[in-house]
Amino acid sequence: MSFYKIIDGQRYDRKVLELAEELIQGRGDGRISRDDAAKLLESVQDDRGITETENRSLFYILDHYNFTDSATEWLSDKLSIHAPIELPALIST
């Protein structure tokens, strides 16, 4: 199995997409909480830093999954620090 998932011709980190799916299953209201958002960010942080593909994956999750307001704000803020300049503009708030 590949480390990546291709969606509309773009490469995404399979691990973080699968984690997002796990976080919304089976409990609560199906939204990603602030604690869940921290788990997503933690899942992509390692000695290499956050790669472009990992950033793209987190922005994809922000755009396609239902987050609590505080989780959206928190993760958006964290990604703005790490993301290339063009990526934060993709966040719709």
Image (spheres, grey):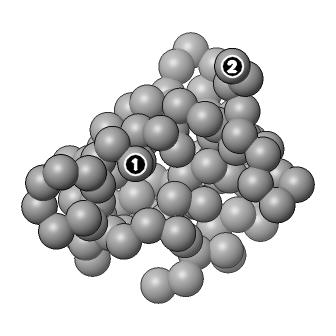
Residue 34 visible in the picture: no
Q: Are marks 2 and 1 in contact (CB under 8 Å)?
A: no
Label 1 is placed on what type of residue? Glu
Number of the label disc, if any, that sits on residue 73 = none
Which residue lies at the image location 70% right of the left edge and 63% below the top edge? Answer: 87
Element marked by disc 2? loop
Hey, what amino acid is under mark 2?
Met
Q: Residues under labels 2 and 1: Cα distance?
A: 18 Å
What residue appears at the point 12 percent right and 54 percent down from the top-left corner?
Answer: 27
Q: Is residue 41 above or below residue 42?
A: below
Q: Earlier in the sequence, mark 2 or mark 1?
A: 2
Label ID, residue 21: 1
In the picture, measured across the screen, residue 85 lies left or right of residue 31, that is right
Which corner quadrant holds the N terminus? top right
Residue 45 x/y as whole percent: 49, 28
Residue 1: image tag = 2
Query: Residue drawn at (29%, 55%), measured in percent from left and top?
Result: 24
Q: Secondary structure at mark 1?
A: helix
